[in-house]
């Protein structure tokens, strides 16, 4: 079926006889579409999904259902099949990345592997990133095919989730496969919201300078976070020379530093404890048609920052100043002190934090003094 038609064929479990009764257990699948529109046969679905489990020895209901928690705290039970179906309960979860060679998904794949997931993926061409992922244990294919998603050597189960790059179209064969087999699909932004949930998230947004600023913040917080607290986790949209895994650092602590990308409105799926905005300019004209649209997106991003957190913005940037004026916020937060506190930085005298006496020394080293408004010089840095 087409992607649109496949999207309507949501597979749901129909338990027709409790286990233990005469005849054993019977679990069948049926499309949840009106009876008049339901096709006589769904021949394109795998026999694994159409198979009926009839009292298989050693099975329990936990082998058929998996419980997932949604962001709002509610519980969702998803049918995953029995021991005979190929969607059996398993100790290691699998995630498949479509477009895994891009800077956005390759670092998320490294994070998933570090957290114990079986990682598979595909991309349209070979690259150093794909080879690096293979060396780390990922099963990566070149080219998009349905077989990349299905069970294969080294991956004896269907994915628990498929994460799709913003560059991948909706009619991609692996996306259609996910719809056919009822595998949860995530765009990159939604997956980021999931993997950062439960952490103290520090999101770094801005039209320019996100990767550099994210790396610097991660280095500073990492040096301040004792090893006993597990260390900082950080993800950037590029590679950092001093990081072993290129664009990812994986710790066990609560702090998560993330490059928050505005492309495709990816950053709107984040719930940040703190946020940094380096600058705001009109960019990504395939997504934003005007300055007003991109300002609205950044404004919505800031609305998702914790009320008890902080927002740090470049006070020298016109786009950041426009955001401050729109939200009518200052050092004590929004109206009547509600919302996160806001601090500005830059060279200008009106900022809360200023770099003064800036000098470029030999070897490209920059020295400067840090001044806080009303507090004098706090530190001389390099």
Image (tube, rainbow, N blue to C red):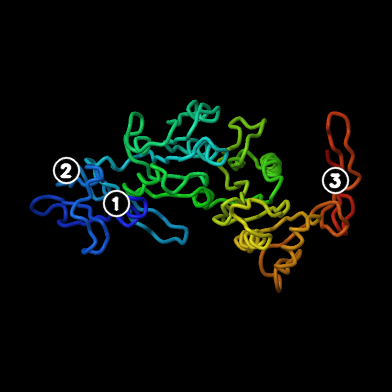
Residue 374 placed where, x, y %?
Answer: 88, 59
Q: Where does the image place residue 237, in percent across and percent down from the top left?
A: 61, 41
Pointer 1: what residue? Answer: 79
Q: Do the residues labelled 2 and 1 touch (CB within 8 Å)?
A: no
Query: Measuring 26% from the left and 46% from the top, which residue is drawn there?
Result: 81
Contact (Cβ within 8 Å) of mark 3 with mark 1: no
- Farthest residue to the bottom: give it: 336
Q: Residue at x 83, y 32 (%)?
A: 364
SS state under label 3: strand
Q: Of label 3 and label 1, which has the lower sequence position?
A: 1
Residue depth check, mark 3 versus mark 1: number of the one nearer the observer: 1
Q: Is residue 19 left or right of residue 213?
A: left
Residue picked out by circle 2: 56
Q: Tell me if mark 3 has few (under 14), some (14-19) or many (20+) residues whose alpha carbon lies within 10 angstroms of its own.
A: few
Q: Which label belongs to residue 319? A: none
| Labels 2 and 3: the sequence-earlier one | 2
User: Would residue 140 be visible to someone looking at this image?
Assistant: no
Quadrant in the rendering for residue 265 = bottom right
Residue at the spot of label 3: 379
Front one among 136 and 57: 136
Query: Which callout, 2 or 1, points to the residue nearer the camera?
Result: 1
Relative to 100, is 81 on the left or the right? left
């Amino acid at each position: 079926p087409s992607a649109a038609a496949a999207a309507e064929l949501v597979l749901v479990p129909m338990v027709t006889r409790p286990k233990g009764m005469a005849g054993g257990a019977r679990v069948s699948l049926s499309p949840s579409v009106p009876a008049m529109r339901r096709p006589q046969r769904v021949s394109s679905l795998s026999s694994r999904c159409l198979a009926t489990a009839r009292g298989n020895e050693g099975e329990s209901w936990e082998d058929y259902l998996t419980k997932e928690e949604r962001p709002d705290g509610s519980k969702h039970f998803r049918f995953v099949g029995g021991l005979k179906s190929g969607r059996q309960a398993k100790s290691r979860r699998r995630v498949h990345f479509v477009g895994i060679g891009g800077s956005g998904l390759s670092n998320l794949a490294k994070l998933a592997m570090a957290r114990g997931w079986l990682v598979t993926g595909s991309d349209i061409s070979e690259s150093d990133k794909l080879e690096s992922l293979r060396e780390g244990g990922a099963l990566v294919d070149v080219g998009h095919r349905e077989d990349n998603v299905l069970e294969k050597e080294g991956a004896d189960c269907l994915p628990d989730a498929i994460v799709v790059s913003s560059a991948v179209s909706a009619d991609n064969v692996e996306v259609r496969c996910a719809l056919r087999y009822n595998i949860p699909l995530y765009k990159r932004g939604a997956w980021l919201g999931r993997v950062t949930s439960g952490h103290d998230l520090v999101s770094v947004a801005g039209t320019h300078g996100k990767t550099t600023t994210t790396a610097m913040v991660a280095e500073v917080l990492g040096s301040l976070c004792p090893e006993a607290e597990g260390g900082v986790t950080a993800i950037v949209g590029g590679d950092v020379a001093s990081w072993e895994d290129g664009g990812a650092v994986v710790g066990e602590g609560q702090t998560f530093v993330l490059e928050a990308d505005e492309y495709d409105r990816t950053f709107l799926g984040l719930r940040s404890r703190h946020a940094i905005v380096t600058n705001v300019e009109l960019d990504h004209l395939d997504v934003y048609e005007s300055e007003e649209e991109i300002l609205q997106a950044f404004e919505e991003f800031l609305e998702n920052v914790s009320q008890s957190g902080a927002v740090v913005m470049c006070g020298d940037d016109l786009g950041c100043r426009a955001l401050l004026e729109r939200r009518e916020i200052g050092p004590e937060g929004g109206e009547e002190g509600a919302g996160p506190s806001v601090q500005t930085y830059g060279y200008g005298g009106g900022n809360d934090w200023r770099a003064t006496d800036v000098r470029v020394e030999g070897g490209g080293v920059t020295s400067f003094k840090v001044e806080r408004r009303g507090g004098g010089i706090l530190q001389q840095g390099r």
